[in-house]
Image (cartoon, rainbow, N blue to C red):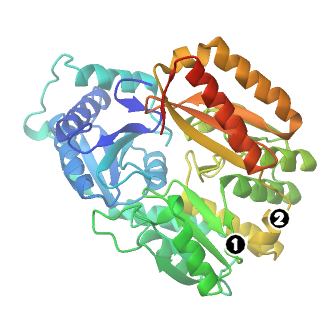
Amino acid sequence: MGKYFGTDGFRGEANKDLTVDHAFRIGRYLGWYYGKDHKARVVIGKDTRRSSYMFENALCAGLTASGADAYLLHVTSTPSVSFIARADDFDCGIMISASHNPYYDNGIKLINAQGEKMEESVLDGIEAYLDGGEELPYAQGADIGQTVDYASGRNRYLGYLISLATRSYKDFRIGLDCANGSTWMMAKAVFDALGADTYVVANKPDGLNINVDCGSTHIGNLQKLVKENHLDVGFAFDGDADRCLAVDEKGNVVNGDHIMYVCAKYMQDRGTLGDSKVVTTIMSNMGLYKALDALGIGYEKTAVGDKYVAENMRQNGHLIGGEQSGHIIFGRLANTGDGLLTAIKVMEAITETKMSLSELAAPMTMYPQRLKNVVVTDKDETLACQMVQDEVRAVEEELGENGRVVLRKSGTEPLLRVMVEATSLETCEQMCDRIIAAMDRAGKLIRIK
């Protein structure tokens, strides 16, 4: 990761960590970089944060000042920008969003012409320019770029999603939690078009309420909606709709690991999985791996971040992968996590098998899991500390095949994340505390966050 761009773009508090000047200069660099030998075309989407409009204007000013044309999808999802960048031959795409973060944060996610996360070489060039690199020439006269309304691109993406459904949802009562974000109009439009009887919450954005007690990070509202209205299934998205979690007809949460299991088994049963493996991060639950083992489905583990899942899938030709948080990637259909697409694929499994979501997910049992965030004096020194390493090994030996430990650095904060899985939550808690106590004895612990 660079100084500004992490695994999921340049993210921070609006006009504090990420300013309009940053956005303008990012636009200036991209317009110049892609416009060296032709008129550059860049497509831009945004979520519903108040600051997204400000950043959209700044990016457009920078792009057009460097001679590029900026095409505006307006409020839309991150996966729609990925789809349109690829389908309509844009030089790159930009999504303005901080995903599941609070409204006062924002981010700039850059997407290449293939709909994938931007190459590191381009990000390195942008960072050098942000830090005072050589000034770029301004376009003049007829070479100045223009801003183009491109809402038709967003509508084409919605049409693509609708075309993927294998059956009508006419007899289904479906709940949708739009997180007051990107899907506030899109989700209902898709499910209404497919014939569902839709019940929608968190679809009234005001610029300040994105992700507030709603969406995939606060799924209680959707559980309540499903149970009180006796719905067949519910889907919750995050602020920019690259995540999806589900709720079954009983009101139980169906997380990203469950969704990968359900979809991989469905693909295996239909003969469409082939030799493909399920690609997860190291944070997926042991229950997923044991359930896949029982089916004879292979899997691979990557570092945390859907970026790494996507890279593994692309390099090895795997068809499904994702994260427990609901970033699910369907390799032949998209190059990034797509919440709406995930919901459609889950509905395909439900409608084609004529089974409820609770029945489809039942064979996978989640192991109890405890995650603690620990502020330490130095992340790398703490990971390398012999006393900490010895305690981790001791815990792993005691857990054996009935649990595991993941100790990793946060990519965005001065934290270590201590995660333990075991057969009981009490054991998870005890083992987490043992590892943290070793950090304290070694003089590395500042506090548990």
Residue in the image at 70% along x and 47% along y: 369
> At which x and y percent is residue 428?
72, 43
Report how many numbered discs are placed on residues in the image.
2
What label sits on residue 248 in the rendered view? 1
Q: Nearer the viewer, residue 108 or 28?
A: 108
> At which x and y percent is residue 328?
62, 51
Q: Secondary structure at mark 2?
A: loop
Residue 24 visible in the current orientation: yes
Q: Quadrant of residue 202?
A: bottom left
Q: Is residue 432 above or below residue 48?
A: above
Residue in the image at 32% along x and 61% along y: 48
The kind of residue on which mark 1 rests is: Asp
Badge 1: few (under 14), some or many (20 or more) residues near its Cα, within 10 Å? many
The kind of residue on which mark 2 rests is: Ala
- Apparent side of residue 168 relative to residue 158 in the rendered image (left or right): right
Q: Nearer the viewer, residue 53 or 63?
A: 53
Q: Marks 2 and 1, Cα distance to the nearest angstrom?
A: 11 Å
Q: Is residue 202 above or below residue 24?
A: below
Sequence order check: which comes first, mark 2 or mark 1? 1
Q: Which residue is mark 2?
A: 362
Residue in the image at 57% along x and 78% along y: 224
Q: Nearer the viewer, residue 163 or 78?
A: 78
> At which x and y percent is residue 364?
82, 56
> At which x and y percent is residue 279?
71, 40
Q: Is residue 240 above or below residue 62?
A: below
Residue in the image at 78% along x and 24% along y: 394
- Apparent side of residue 304 relative to residue 296 in the rendered image (left or right): left
Q: Quadrant of residue 111?
A: top left
- Apparent side of residue 67 relative to residue 382 in the rendered image (left or right): left
